[in-house]
Image (spheres, rainbow, N blue to C red):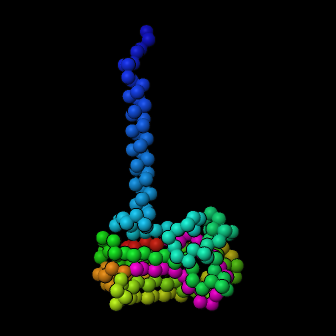
Amino acid sequence: MQQRFPKNFQIAVLLFCFVFAMAAFSLVKLKVKNKDVTSGSTEINSWFFDLESNSILENGSTTKSGLAHSGTHSCKMDENTEYSSTFIFNQENLSNRSSFREVVYSFYIFAESPVDGVEAVYSFETVNNKKSDWQNQAFNISSGEWKKYEIIFPLNNDFRLYDGVMKLYVWNKNKQNFLIDDIAINLR
């Protein structure tokens, strides 16, 4: 016995598939938008940069193809490069900034020989430049393999109370050779 479907069954199935596909696409797009710093979302508190594409990092000219922790691009530090790619974030739209107490700045570094005189830097300047906070933490780089570095900077009350701009970068004071990749920032 052959079973018959209603006359418009095929159209209904096609319409259902179309609606389902559009709903799935919207969810994926929404998820990506919530990770996009430029979207104006107030829920963002962490960022990751693999340096594979154009990003919002300033001083992007330091990003070169070649040896990398992941992918094919990393930030090349050398005798001509004092400052790494820099994360800059205007936190005025961050609705929950009063809850954050520290920023965790992590990255992978590779050097062919040991490196000293390197510093991770955090700065915060209020919009009117009346208040600022500048912190640095020196660290030495071991050689021969990619190593993860994690630097924690405490956030002062100015970050929680005033609109301003946060910056994070690596300062190559002695202008030595090394690579930086897979940069992560997390407010907590």
- Near-viewer residue (29 or 113): 29
Q: Is residue 68 magenta?
A: no
Residue 145, compared with residue 52, is above or below; it is below
Look at the magenta stretch and give its main secondary structure.
strand
Q: Is residue 168 magenta?
A: yes
Quick check: 91 left or right of 145?
A: left
Which part of the image, by quadrant, shows the N terminus? top left
**Residue drawn 34% across and 90% down?**
130
Quick check: 102 left or right of 72?
A: left
**Residue drawn 33% across and 71% down?**
93
Determine which quarter of the picture holds residue 14.
Answer: top left
What is the span of residues highlighted in magenta in the rendered image?
165-184
Q: Can you give x and y, in whole percent of width and height, for residue 181 in the image?
A: 59, 71
Residue 132, compared with residue 16, is above or below; it is below
**Whether residue 156 is visible:** no
**Residue drawn 43% across and 67% down?**
37
Q: Can you give x and y, in whole percent of width and height, for residue 82 in the image?
A: 60, 85
- Extreme residue toward the top, this view: 1
Determine which quarter of the picture holds residue 85.
Answer: bottom right
**Residue drawn 46% across and 80% down?**
167
